[in-house]
Amino acid sequence: MAKAAKKAAPKKTVKKAAPKKAAPKKAVKKAAPKKAAPKKAAKKAAPKKAVKKAAPKKKAAKAKTKRKPNAAFMAPLTVSEKLAAVIGSKPVPRTEVIRGIWKYIKKNNLQDAKNRRMINADAKLKPVFGKDQVSMFEMAKILNKHLS
């Protein structure tokens, strides 16, 4: 009978193993964030409605504030003699100089037929550009030298 008593004692220690019961509780805690995920999706849906409401306010703000031109672009600049032969000798803002050059280019059909980015210089433009053909992006840089 003593042997039976010894066997019974180890069984009691096996039953006392409580950490196994604690493990399922951790699994329950992991399940809780899964439930929170749908709530996040619901929260994302709510700001979309708020964004739709905010959009008309921005349009109203744009209507109230009128855009003002930069004074530096509107300041009249004196034109060199070479450039004056093309656009005139009056002091004009930088924007009007570019506009006048493009007007002259279009009027005289000076854009290259194959590559429209290139401007072919005629007798009046050659002294301004300094070469036979200029890129439209390079043109503003070159014209800057003729303004003061």
Image (cartoon, grey):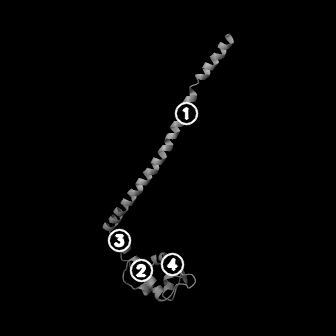
* Residues at marks 3 and 1, CA–CA distance in whole angstroms: 73 Å
Identify the residue under disc 2. 97
Q: Position of residue 63 (x, y in %)?
A: 32, 68
* Residues at marks 4 and 3, CA–CA distance in whole angstroms: 25 Å
Give the mark nearest the N terminus, 1 or 2.
1
Residue sitting at x 47%, y 76%: 140
Secondary structure found at label 3: helix
Identify the residue under disc 4. 136
How many marks on residues? 4
Secondary structure found at label 2: helix
Quadrant of the rendering where the C terminus is positioned = bottom left
Q: Position of residue 21 (x, y in %)?
A: 55, 29
> Viewed as shown, does residue 15 lie left or right of 49?
right
Amino acid carrying mark 1 in the image: Pro
Give the mark nearest the N terminus, 3 or 1.
1
Give the mark nearest the N terminus, 4 or 2.
2
- Among the 4 quarters of the image, the one containing residue 70: bottom left
Instruction: Kindly check if marks 4 and 2 are in contact, taking CB atoms under 8 A apart as contact.
Output: no
* Residues at marks 4 and 2, CA–CA distance in whole angstroms: 14 Å
Q: Residues within 10 Å of mark 2 (few under 14, many from 20)?
A: many
Secondary structure found at label 4: helix
Residue sitting at x 63%, y 20%: 11
Identify the residue under disc 1. 24
Q: Which mark is residue 71?
A: 3
Secondary structure found at label 1: helix
Give the mark nearest the N terminus, 2 or 3.
3
Give the mark nearest the N terminus, 4 or 3.
3
Amino acid carrying mark 2 in the image: Val
